[in-house]
Image (cartoon, rainbow, N blue to C red):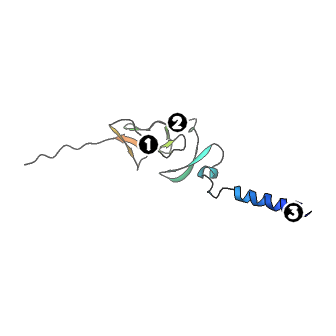
Amino acid sequence: MLALKISAILVSTYMVAAMSTEPAPATAKCGLLSFQWKGPKGIECLSIGGTLVNASPPDGMKCPKHYYYRPEGYCAPRRPSNDKPDCENEYLKWNETTFTCTAVTTSAPVAAN
């Protein structure tokens, strides 16, 4: 009987020691096949892969590769990533306000007098 109690204590101790002290990943809060993303509306859950119905961005705007345009008016990633959005074009730049790739505006150089 004593051996059984000792075995039970050892097993429970092993189980506690084997548990991770790391917090659960953020995706655990969103459910299966979803992930958390911080966008223009704050933290939201997005479906991995995006939506079945994709809207088109307005003229002058584009979504980066692996992003899709949401009907709410911004681009969102299709999968979780820590990488900065890449607009893949020297004439487009990621806009942190609109969450889209927008045309880079260059100002004319000021002539020296």
**Does residue 40 appear left or right of residue 102 in this picture?**
right
Q: Is residue 14 above or below residue 98?
A: below
Mark 3 neighbour class, 10 Å CA radius: few under 14, some 14 to 19, many 20 or more: few
Q: Position of residue 109 (x, y in %)?
A: 17, 44
Q: CA distance from mark 3 to mark 1?
A: 56 Å
Disc with the residue nearer the chain's start (2 vs 3)? 3
Secondary structure beneath dot 1 equals loop
Q: Amino acid at mark 3?
A: Lys
Front-lying residue, 4 or 54: 4
- Residue labelled with disc 1: 85
Secondary structure beneath dot 2 equals loop
Q: Is residue 19 above or below residue 49?
A: below
Secondary structure beneath dot 3 equals helix
Q: Position of residue 16 (x, y in %)?
A: 73, 59
Q: Residue at x 28, y 42 (%)?
A: 105
Q: CA distance from mark 2 to mark 3?
A: 60 Å
